[in-house]
């Protein structure tokens, strides 16, 4: 959520930021509501001051034996108007808050202008793309032959996008999760095991509501949401709390299953592991001092990139343009791994800075040593990493002519095997 005072004082800047994201602009309605709110507050405070002054006058009149009936009658109308203002103010503030929740975060000045994924900037590539003297096959053909992931039975049990991982497929998943968590711990992230359902306030806090309701599964009877990412419960872990400045940065790593309806997904992007409704992911979350949040974003990105380098997977880094960035972020990097069997890039991580946007919704602050006053922290998060496409890339990158898959060396202590056959 953007600060109302900031919107009031920087309306043109905010409008331009909203336009750059291709979102609807309701700033004029917000400014109108803000003006009405301030006018009601001013009128109410004036009447309350008058009521207090006249109340004291009535007391003196009664003490002096004077007739205060006319003054009391006048105050009755003032009392009624104060009640009307309080009710009107409550309604006005509720409507204003609803409007504020629909305003997206505005892009950082370093974010490139653009409308589509074609406008994203590729700023870094690592590793050589796999080539071979045999036909490199897509992962869905290899896993079918190896029998390590079963989409058909998953569809029978739950529906499309809910596969079973079998034998060494399941063990590879578990190995990657443990590897990612251990690497996060080495980088100073404290591990959290978080709930995989959240309440509405939590979903609103990180910006899933209102914006991504259609992407979430809902347990309607209990008004709970299946999490689309561990970002939601982990960031809400400190909702309505205040850090000491010396505690910052606070860093967490959390593994969870994630659930996304992916409404409208179709075509080649949904083949095999490319797009699932349930998948595993390790999420990295930071609470940082505003002065260093963009340095912390680069460090976060480096932590995610390091995992791909250790796995020996070719990847690139995209700096997302304004129109392809999302509702909540001020700046966002995507890491895309090369899948040689498909000859395409697959997103495996997004690393984002939200500045105070989430913290303001969740009331997460730190006590400034300089001013002694509470200020909002900046929140950041990034996938470290999302498993399905990492698994897809490993299978395609490390496939053999016989259709076997060599396990990356860094995973051997976790898998206890070196090849899937």
Image (tube, rainbow, N blue to C red):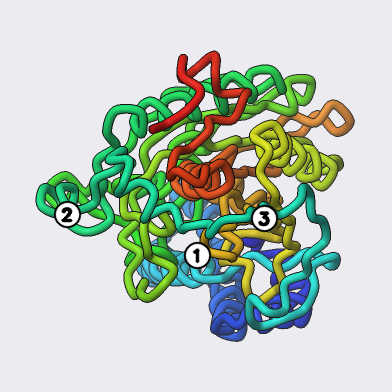
In the rendering, at what x and y percent does residue 126 appear? 78, 49
The residue indicated by pointer 1 is 101
The mark that comes first in sequence, 3 or 1, is 1
Q: Is residue 54 visible?
A: no
Give the residue at x 82% y 56%. 124
Q: Residue at x 45, y 43 (%)?
A: 402
Quadrant the N terminus occupies: bottom right
Do residues under tags 2 and 1 come within 8 Å of each other at their CB atoms? no
Task: Using the image as rendered, state which of residue 203 and residue 162 is in the foreground.
Answer: 162
Q: Residue furthest right?
A: 370
For the residue pair 148 and 18, the one nearer the viewer reads as 148
User: How far apart in space, not on screen, are marks 3 and 1 (Cα)?
Assistant: 49 Å
Label 2 secondary element: helix
Q: Is residue 233 visible?
A: yes
Q: Position of residue 143 (x, y in %)?
A: 35, 46
Report the side of 313 relative to 197 (left or right): right
User: At which x and y percent is residue 87?
Assistant: 37, 66
Q: Residues within 10 Å of mark 2 (few under 14, many from 20)?
A: some
Q: Please tell me the numbered disc located at residue 131.
A: 3
CA gap between label 3 and label 2 equals: 33 Å
Q: Are marks 3 and 2 in contact (CB under 8 Å)?
A: no
Mark whose residue sits in front, 2 or 1: 2
Q: Position of residue 347 (x, y in %)?
A: 57, 57
Image height of 42 relative to 150, above or below? below
Q: Of helix, strand and loop, which one carries label 3?
A: loop
Tell me the tag on residue 155: 2
């Amino acid at each position: 959520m953007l600060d109302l005072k900031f919107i009031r004082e920087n309306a043109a800047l905010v409008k331009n930021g909203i336009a750059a994201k291709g979102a609807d602009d309701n700033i004029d309605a917000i400014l109108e509501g803000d003006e009405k709110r301030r006018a009601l507050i001013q009128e109410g405070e004036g009447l309350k001051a008058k009521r207090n002054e006249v109340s004291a006058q009535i007391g003196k009149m009664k003490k002096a034996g004077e007739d205060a009936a006319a003054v009391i009658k006048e105050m009755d109308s003032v009392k009624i108007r104060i009640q009307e203002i309080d009710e009107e103010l409550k309604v006005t503030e509720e409507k204003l808050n609803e409007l504020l929740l629909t305003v997206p975060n505005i892009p950082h000045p370093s974010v490139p202008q653009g409308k589509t994924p074609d406008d994203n900037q590729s700023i870094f590539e690592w590793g050589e793309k796999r080539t071979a003297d045999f036909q490199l096959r897509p992962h869905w053909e290899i896993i079918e032959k190896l029998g390590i992931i079963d989409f058909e039975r998953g569809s029978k049990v739950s529906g499309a996008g809910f596969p079973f991982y079998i034998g060494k497929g399941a063990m590879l998943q578990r190995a990657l999760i443990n590897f990612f968590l251990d690497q996060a711990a080495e980088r100073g992230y404290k591990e959290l095991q978080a709930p995989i359902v959240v309440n509405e306030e939590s979903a609103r806090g990180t910006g899933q509501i209102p914006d991504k309701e259609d992407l979430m599964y809902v347990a309607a009877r209990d008004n709970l949401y299946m999490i689309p990412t561990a970002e939601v419960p982990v960031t809400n872990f400190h909702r309505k709390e205040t850090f000491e400045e010396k505690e910052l940065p606070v860093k967490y790593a959390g593994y969870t299953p994630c659930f996304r309806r992916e409404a409208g997904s179709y075509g080649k992007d949904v083949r095999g592991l490319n797009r699932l409704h349930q998948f595993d992911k390790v999420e990295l979350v930071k609470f940082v001092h505003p002065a260093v949040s963009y340095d912390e974003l680069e460090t976060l990105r480096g932590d995610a990139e390091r995992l791909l380098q250790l796995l020996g997977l070719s990847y690139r880094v995209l700096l997302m343009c304004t129109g392809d960035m999302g509702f909540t972020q001020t700046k966002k990097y995507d890491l895309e791994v090369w899948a040689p069997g498909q000859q395409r890039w697959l997103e495996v991580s997004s690393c984002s800075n939200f500045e105070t946007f989430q913290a303001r919704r969740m009331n997460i602050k730190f006590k400034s040593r300089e001013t002694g006053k509470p200020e909002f922290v900046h929140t950041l998060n990034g996938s470290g990493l999302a498993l399905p496409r990492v698994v897809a890339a490993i299978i395609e990158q490390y496939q053999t002519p016989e259709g076997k898959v060599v396990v990356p060396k860094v995973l051997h202590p976790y898998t206890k095997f070196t090849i899937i056959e």
